[in-house]
Amino acid sequence: MHQGVDNKLIVAKFAMHGYNIHPSAVEILKKNVNPQNIDFVISHICKLVNSFIITPDDIVSVLDTIKEFEKKVRDAEKKTKTKVEEVYKHSEGIKIRDITGRSSCEGSIEDFVAYFNSRFEKLSKILRKRIRPTPISALHRLNGEQVEVVGIVNSVRETQNNSAIIELEDKTGIVNVVATDRLKDQALELLGDEVIGVIGTVRGRNIIADRIIFPDVPMKDRAKFDFGVVFISDTHFGSKEFLQKEWNMFINWLNGECEEKKVAELAEKVRYVIVAGDIVDGVGIYPDQEKDLAILDIYKQYEFAAEQLDRIPENIKIILSVGNHDAIRQAEPQPALPKEYRDLFSKNVIHVGNPAYVELNGLKVLIYHGRSLDDIITRIPRLSYDRPHEAMIELLKRRHLSPRYGERSPIAPEKEDLLVIDEVPDILHCGHVHTYSVGVYRGVILINSSTWQSQTEFQKKVNLNPMPGNVAVYYNGGIARLRFCN
Ligand SMILES: [Fe+2]
């Protein structure tokens, strides 16, 4: 027998669909359905039955369909697990994990259910190492007691009496968490849809919070490897504003043409160049973009990109990720470029999706183009486009690359939420905002790596001031900043 779902909750869930359910029918449902699948099963039943009062007979008549569905969910989970084990591709000390070749998303309701279940499972697993959550449905029996809960943030609102109310949901129910004083400020920085833990006291239907706990990353030592990695992004090949002269200086430096001895020596150490997306400027990305384009054809833009990357010494491996300007689906996670474009590039170019976990001879880099940074910087007033690494800290705290669902960053509801930061990287590398900043958070190096495009008319209109031609070079645990632009 399955336990764990409250009878009242089942009745309430049916009521939300406009149905009443007989108490004996609730009991049959509880005996036969895994609590994890209860939401989907309820909406499924509501589609199958004709009467407004659901009887035990109604439930019995759909039991076979329900069991079939649960089997499908189990099979899908098994499949996902096998896929996760397959994901590392080995090639000369390089391992890659991304969505390429394993997208299974069709955008159906079931996909959304599975996606959010995966997000909740992965993040609550991290939180459960530090707290022991009580199911929300059991809180009504614990009035006055201190409890720990884990849930997904549905909404946050400020109240008139100097507090904030977080609506928190787990698989068993919904509760309002009241955050006052310092916790109120923390609550108002929540983006929505992130999974958090709360420690607090039950007061009637609410929890008065004592602490809000983020999944966060553990403290670690900074990774030290004696090879160089160059971090760049947002090359925007094909744009009229592409900075050819500055790019040439960068290429010359990588080819050993630099008068300053120390800087030239650094180039000799470089074994990898990582590009965090927006390889080309693309076509039709924003209104009237053609006015900003030097190359109007997308294929020709990639031909030019391949030509420019070919100027990098061939002993250096180039890891090429994608962004919202590239010729691939916009919803994240994005797979690597399609084959027709990949084929234009030389053999030393390794194509990856967005995000991508890349392990380079032991150095773990998480590449994420950074579209969600727009949502975070807009939502949290203390953050700014001038210091994007501070917004990247918020991603690490939430252990998620795009916490807010359905804002400016579209997300594809894959069965497994690949935007969860399930593995703590040595370096988190983003781009997208076209500025440069570097920082360290709990031993993880954060890099936002500039652009090779000067300000476009569109960027002028939206007040975006790029900091182009800045390059971050990792060597032995440190980051050097090279400026190829005045
Ligand atoms: Fe960009």
Image (cartoon, helix red, strand yellow):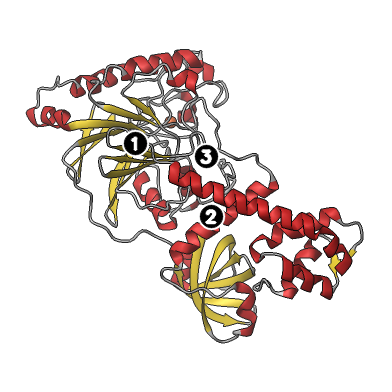
Q: From the viewer's perspective, tell me whether residue 450 is left or right of residue 369.
A: left
Q: Which-is-in-front pick, marks 3 and 2?
A: 2
Q: Label 3 belongs to which residue?
A: 332
Q: Which-is-in-front pick, marks 3 and 1?
A: 1
Which numbered disc flags the more N-terminal residue, 1 or 2?
A: 1
Please state which amino acid type lies under the numbered disc 1.
Answer: His
Which numbered disc flags the more N-terminal residue, 3 or 2?
A: 2
Mark 2, other Cα within 10 Å: few <14 / some 14–19 / many ≥20: many
Q: Is residue 478 visible in this depiction of the protein?
A: yes
Quadrant holding ligand 1? top left
* Rendered position, 316 above or below 428: above
What separation in Å lies between label 3 and label 1 (alpha carbons)? 24 Å
Find numbered disc 1 in the image and state the secondary structure of the residue it sits on.
Answer: loop
Is the residue marked 3 within 8 Å of ligand 1, measured from its CB?
no
Image coords of residue 213 (percent x, y): 44, 67
Q: Residue at x 34, y 14 (%)?
A: 307
* Rendered position, 369 above or below 422: above
Is the residue marked 2 within 8 Å of ligand 1, measured from its CB?
no
Mark 3 and mark 2 residues within 8 Å of each other at the beta carbon: no
Is the residue marked 1 within 8 Å of ligand 1, measured from its CB?
no
Q: Is residue 417 visible in this depiction of the protein?
A: no
What separation in Å lies between label 3 and label 2 (alpha carbons)? 14 Å
Q: Residue at x 87, y 63 (%)?
A: 58
